[in-house]
Amino acid sequence: MDQDAFRQTYHEVNERFCAFEKAILTLQCQCSEAHKFYIAEREGVHCNSDAGQQQCLQLLEVLRSRARFALRTTSEDRKNLLPHGKAIRIQVGGLRGLYTALNTGQPVPARIENVIDLVNRAIKHFGSLDKLPFSLVMQQISAYHSRTRSRRRKGKKP
């Protein structure tokens, strides 16, 4: 299946996509509203909640606009076309920052267990997503780095 056909089929099958799909597919988090599906041996994540999807999309938008300096991106027009590594940093680092803001003094878990629960708790605690303590959240976004690929040594092949 070519990339264009995959994208078209993906959008037809998955009208309510998960905003944190990359983080879920890399096993960095889970969500009670997320449902995985497969198309041509590829995975996708569907959100089971309209309201939940809107809250998560709003959170990602706020994180993207606030994280431009931390990610060294300044162009407003390319914010939706972030490379995979930067998108992962925003998603995983942002959720870890949210966890840190809500659970002061506790270590950040290796995996965020329920994204929608974390987002709802943050909205309830801070009043809105615009009132989050972004200094804590940006620290986690800046600190998070996904796994790096192992590089092959130059030289003789075994």
Image (cartoon, rainbow, N blue to C red):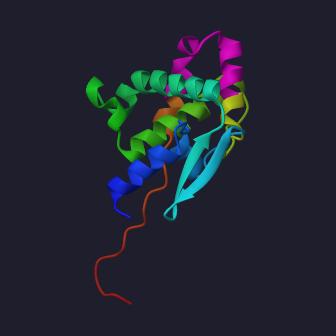
Identify the residue shown where x is 71% and y is 37%.
Answer: 114
Q: Quadrant of residue 158?
A: bottom left
What secondary structure predominates along the stretch shown in magenta? helix
Q: Is residue 124 magenta?
A: yes
- Magenta residues, start to end: 118-138
Q: Is residue 145 visible?
A: no
Identify the residue shown where x is 52% and y is 38%.
Answer: 15
Q: Quadrant of residue 56?
A: top right
Q: Is residue 33 visible?
A: yes
User: Residue 6's spot in the image, x, y percent?
Assistant: 40, 55
The answer to whether residue 18 is left or right of residue 101 is left
Q: Is residue 4 above or below residue 62?
A: below
- Viewer-closest of 109 and 126: 126
Q: Quadrant of the N terminus?
A: bottom left
The answer to whether residue 114 is left or right of residue 23 is right
- Viewer-closest of 57 and 37: 37
Identify the residue shown where x is 44% and y is 57%.
Answer: 148
Work out which residue is located at the far bottom of the displayed protein and give it: 158
Work out which residue is located at the far front of the displayed protein and give it: 12
User: Residue 45's spot in the image, x, y percent?
Assistant: 57, 46
Q: Is residue 157 above or below residue 145?
A: below
User: Residue 102's spot in the image, x, y percent?
Assistant: 69, 23
Q: Is residue 73 magenta?
A: no
Q: Is residue 56 above or below residue 155?
A: above
User: Residue 59's spot in the image, x, y percent?
Assistant: 53, 24
- Viewer-closest of 41 and 62: 41
